[in-house]
Image (cartoon, grey):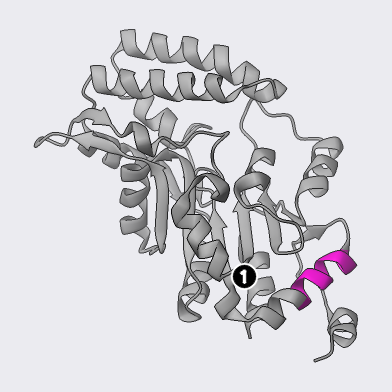
């Protein structure tokens, strides 16, 4: 179908909020022309693919679940670190060194107190669930041989636990890796695997650059404004933000405006189904 005709026929899926439907349609036409062989998908993890179960507290991210398994002394240290660095994160003043220092200090706390990952697994799966539409979207990508990458500033082993539970099979998981002893307790972490909020991008990971070089078109899905930087490029990336704010994040009209300055689309319904419809329309 000629691009002009494709642009005329493009319909934004219900539930997908966009700032410029024509600009998105132009990207869609480019993706359709590239075909499945030229596409990959990059996902954030916490609050993007996961949601809290009914009755759970607000925070069910990897980090908050792990910190709950620290003794009181460890939780107090964790909270002091959180208060110090979360303020920098929210204000946009966090530096690369700040991020490394924050992530490293918390990981060292988990090692110091030898957290039992088996206990973390039970707790995490009891509180965190799967975002509606996720399984169907991953299946659509798998059925069309489109690589799916989870790129997260969380913990690889916790992501693996969740993937096994919900039968999600990403092509690649890029996240900080733990070192465990024979009793499944945390005794270390791989410093060369550290992924934090400011190095969470394709450009800093050779595995992803290799995929991008072969498949330049990418669907990017995240829940924070910073997640827009997980993949580089403009016309080759369709960026979608899931708006699932934390208790300390303010949602306003200006927040939505900021989102649509960095992302092509916004989902407020809590389901990935609108994105599934968009992807399905492109690759079929």
Give the answer, above or below, for where 92 lies relative to 55. Answer: above
Q: Say left or right for 117 vs 99.
A: left
Q: Say left or right for 69 vs 64.
A: left
Q: Residues within 10 Å of mark 1 (few under 14, many from 20)?
A: many
Q: Quadrant of the N terminus?
A: bottom right
Please state which of residues 232 and 154 is positioned toward the viewer in this rendering.
232
Which quadrant of the structure image shows residue 29? bottom right
Q: Element type at marker 1?
A: helix
Q: Say left or right for 156 vs 18.
A: left
Q: Does any portion of residue 71 appear in the rendered image? A: yes
Name the outermost residue toward the left.
Answer: 182
Name the outermost residue toward the bottom.
Answer: 1
The prevailing secondary structure element of the residues shown in magenta is helix
Image coordinates of residue 226 in percent, x first then y, are 66, 39
Residue at 18 percent of width and 31 percent of height: 185
Image coordinates of residue 235 in percent, x first then y, are 76, 63
Q: Does any portion of residue 126 appear in the rendered image? A: no
Please state which of residues 136 and 178 is positioned toward the viewer in this rendering.
178
Give the answer, above or below, for where 195 lies relative to 39. Answer: above
| Residue that label 1 marks | 276
Please state which of residues 205 and 147 is positioned toward the viewer in this rendering.
205
Magenta region, residue range: 21-29
- In the image, is residue 263 part of the stretch drawn in magenta? no
Residue at 66 percent of width and 52 percent of height: 232
Give the answer, above or below, for where 267 lies relative to 60. Answer: below
Which quadrant of the structure image shows residue 244? top right
Count of residue discs: 1
Image coordinates of residue 155 in percent, x first then y, are 38, 39
Q: Quadrant of the C terminus?
A: bottom right
Image coordinates of residue 183 in percent, x first then y, are 10, 35
């Amino acid at each position: 179908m000629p691009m002009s005709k494709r642009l005329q026929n493009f319909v934004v899926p219900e539930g997908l909020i966009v700032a410029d439907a024509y600009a998105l349609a132009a990207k869609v036409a480019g993706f359709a022309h590239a075909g499945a062989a030229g596409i990959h998908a990059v996902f954030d993890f916490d609050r993007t693919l996961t949601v809290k179960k009914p009755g759970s507290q607000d925070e069910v991210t990897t980090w908050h679940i792990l910190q709950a398994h620290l003794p009181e002394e460890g939780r107090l240290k964790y909270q002091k670190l959180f208060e110090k660095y979360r303020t920098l994160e929210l204000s946009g003043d966090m530096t690369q060194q700040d991020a490394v220092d924050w992530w490293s200090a918390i990981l060292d706390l988990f090692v110091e107190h030898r957290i039992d990952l088996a206990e973390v697994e039970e707790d995490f799966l009891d509180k965190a669930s799967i975002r509606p539409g996720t399984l169907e979207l991953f299946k659509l990508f798998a059925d069309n041989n489109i690589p799916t990458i989870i790129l997260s500033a969380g913990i690889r082993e916790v992501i693996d636990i969740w993937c096994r539970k919900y039968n999600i099979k990403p092509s690649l998981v890029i996240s900080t890796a733990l070192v465990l002893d024979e009793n499944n307790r945390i005794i270390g972490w791989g410093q060369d695997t550290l992924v934090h909020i400011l190095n969470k991008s394709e450009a800093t990971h050779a595995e992803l650059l290799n995929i991008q070089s072969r498949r330049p078109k990418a669907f990017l899905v995240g829940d924070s404004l910073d997640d827009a930087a997980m993949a580089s490029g403009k016309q080759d990336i369709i960026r979608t933000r899931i708006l699932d704010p934390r208790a300390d994040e303010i949602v306003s009209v200006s927040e939505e405006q900021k989102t649509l300055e960095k992302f092509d689309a916004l989902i407020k319904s809590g389901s990935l189904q609108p994105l599934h419809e968009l992807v399905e329309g492109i690759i079929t």
